[in-house]
Image: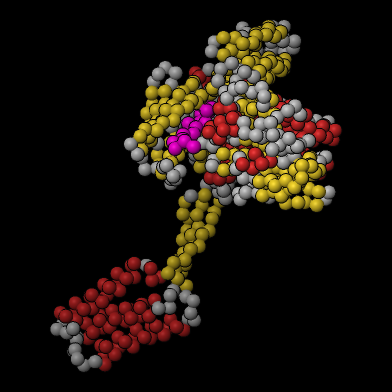
Amino acid sequence: MALHMMNVNIVFDYPAWLILLCLLCGLAYSGILYYKSRKADFPLATKRVLAIFRFITISTLALLLLSPLVERKSQYVEEPLLIFVQDNSASLLFTHDTAYYRDDYLPGLYGFIERMSHTADPRLYTFGERFSRAETIDFSERMTNMSEVFHELDMRYSNRNIGAVVIAGDGLYNRGTNPLYAAARVNYPVYTIAMGDTLPRRDLILKRVNHNEITYLGNRFPVEIDIEALQSEGMTSRLSVSHDGDELFGKNITFASGHHVETISLYLDADEPGMQKYRASLAPLEGEVSLDNNHQDFFIDVIDGRQRVLILANSPHPDVGAIRESLVQNDHFETDVFLMDEFKESAADYDLLVLHQLPSAKHPSPVILDQAAEESIPILFVLGKQTDLGAFNRLAHGLDIQARSDELEETLPGYNQAFALFSMQETTRSLLEYLPPLYSPFGTYSIPGGAHVMLYQKIGQEMTGRPLIVFSELAERRAGVITGEGLWRWRLHAFMRHASHHAFDDMISRMVQYLALKEDRRLFRVQSDQLVYENEAVLFEAELYNPSYELINEPGIQLEIVNEEGLSFPYVMGHTANAYRLDAGIFEPGAYTWEAHVHTRGERLSDRGIFNVSPLDLEGLRTTADHGLLFQMAENSGAGMFYPDQWEALQADILSREDINPRMYAQKDFAELINIKAIFFITLLLLTLEWLIRKRSGSY
């Protein structure tokens, strides 16, 4: 952008006659000082010079009191911008070798930029994983986001004179939205250069592996693999899935057409805990254009962390079966059921106890309750006719029930809208209005402070203050109480209304999951994603607590990352406001382990974990160029599509456009005259010269 013209004016906010008054003030002051005063007798020439100096000084100071503004009007001419955006992704190398781009294409591109610089302002960018100024064009980026081009241009060149944009690529993208939608919003012509090969070539593509992110040890988990075969009719390849070099699944696939698409479903066994790496691969065919898209790694986090639930019953009851059936549907739980007389093991092996009508007259104080108290194992009580309420109250779980009779009363569920320990599905909440009653002890209920009532007892349509399902936490130990029997009717009613037990099963599972959840009480914790891609930075966040569980971050944390070859990478985690953070950067694909430690209060705390870096093979999923997209993009913007050997034709078309012209901008700005330093120095110079002349003439 070049400056074309500038005009400067001085603007006053006051009437013009005040300017004349300022000049008269300067004239009167200098006249009185040098013509009316007889204290100093100067030669006439000297007197005139001194009077002029004083006139200019006083008049200038008086004018500055009027706060004049300097108005500057500038006109700029901006040459049209020609923005050339080059696809720098690896997919372009599938049809041409690097020698073609180095010896033919890139010299033609740079020559075009040089020629266009005489009539426009050319800018060269690349896109792929990111949009950036073109420092190196090597076609090595592992993804393509073409829609980001228009977003970045809008951010960088909003309200600028964009004459034309030229996008060179193969029309393939694997990130972002459809670039046609983004290009439809621009108001400048978008030329395209069609690169790559539109002729399908023989290629096997393992497009996608669909799988669960986590599973539990001992489970069988499903995997779906989408494959595509181009120009391979009648040929056969083998799909295999392997783990640590051992083939877990294999199948020979014969391709029935020139464009064969198929989804293979299979099940794998989760035999080892931790983050497990699997590889799905297709055996290559002769003459394939690319082998990079024949395989794909995927990761499954196998958790050896099922929560063990023990259901103990005073006697056989259909409620016990209903609770058990609800929990066995959930892979998170491993459920055992015993009658109290039959259980001879230790409660310490379980994460939650469900006691049905215990304690009872037959078992008023079972040993298992003492074990649960020692191990701080949470308990879910289900009360009924066989429950010994006196023994239950002595357990000091907070809820106290003083029965008025031995009879039970029918109580309907009423949902507490203020309940916030966990959420329930809308189908479950709507089901509560139609459930049959439970049978609860009739008496006075005392709810402990801090208790959370999930369901209240309703008698008819009247909501009572007595809890039907309530949760409490005493001495860091959670407890829940269902104050009625007859849950089996709820499960049957859920199936009757929805042809599924899901609503009831979900409610029981959420209750058990809340009670069995173990709070992390570690003083030192480090968190990191277990799976990242090779173009993503590995981030760590750490928290350090003092014995009062207050966050601190004074001590330094050392963290070491070790790759599969045993090479270690040491780091020091940085401090945040009250925690720690580390950006470890980008790693090569593979499996890594890490260990962090910190010294505080004379002891060493540590944490460790693993992460896997997965290769990014998006560019190999499609190898046939999409020139139709490039043509449509150019056509929609009123431009044209050209090929890499048509540089002269592209240049001629751009130069022939009448809508690509220099643009003139007018800019006006204001500044206070008093802020101009030159005025200060000129005034100071005049006063100094006046003083020197007076002193030289023998006066002050």
Query: In the rendered image of this protein, does residue 621 appear above or below residue 499?
Result: above
Q: Is residue 572 visible?
A: no
Please give the name of the residue rendered at 62% of the width and 33% of the height, measured from the top-left corner: 365
The number of numbered discs placed on residues in the rendered structure image is: 0
Position of residue 495 in the picture relative to residue 31 (left or right) = right
Q: In which quarter of the image is residue 554?
A: top left
Please give the name of the residue rendered at 38% of the width and 86% of the height, measured from the top-left corner: 24
Please give the name of the residue rendered at 32% of the width and 78% of the height, measured from the top-left corner: 57
Q: In which quarter of the image is residue 656?
A: top right
Residue range of the region highlighted in magenta in the rendering: 521-539
Position of residue 52 in the picture relative to residue 204 (left or right) = left
Q: Where is residue 49 in the image (x, y as percent from the top left)?
A: 25, 80
Looking at this rendering, what residue extends furthest in the right direction? Answer: 496
Q: In which quarter of the image is residue 185?
A: top right
Nearer to us in this view, 445 or 647: 445
Q: Where is residue 615 in the image (x, y as percent from the top left)?
A: 53, 22
Nearer to us in this view, 47 or 427: 427
Nearer to us in this view, 478 or 269: 478
Nearer to us in this view, 432 or 665: 432
Q: Is residue 341 visible?
A: yes
Please give the name of the residue rendered at 75% of the width and 31% of the height, measured from the top-left corner: 319
Which quadrant would the C terminus be assigned to in this image?
A: bottom left
Q: Position of residue 298 (x, y in %)?
A: 59, 21
Query: In the rendered image of this protein, does residue 407 appear above or below residue 57?
Result: above
Q: How is the image coloured?
A: secondary structure
Residue 536 on the magenta segment:
yes
Residue 4 on the magenta segment:
no
Q: Position of residue 386 (x, y in %)?
A: 73, 35
Query: In the rendered image of this protein, does residue 183 appear above or below residue 269?
Result: below
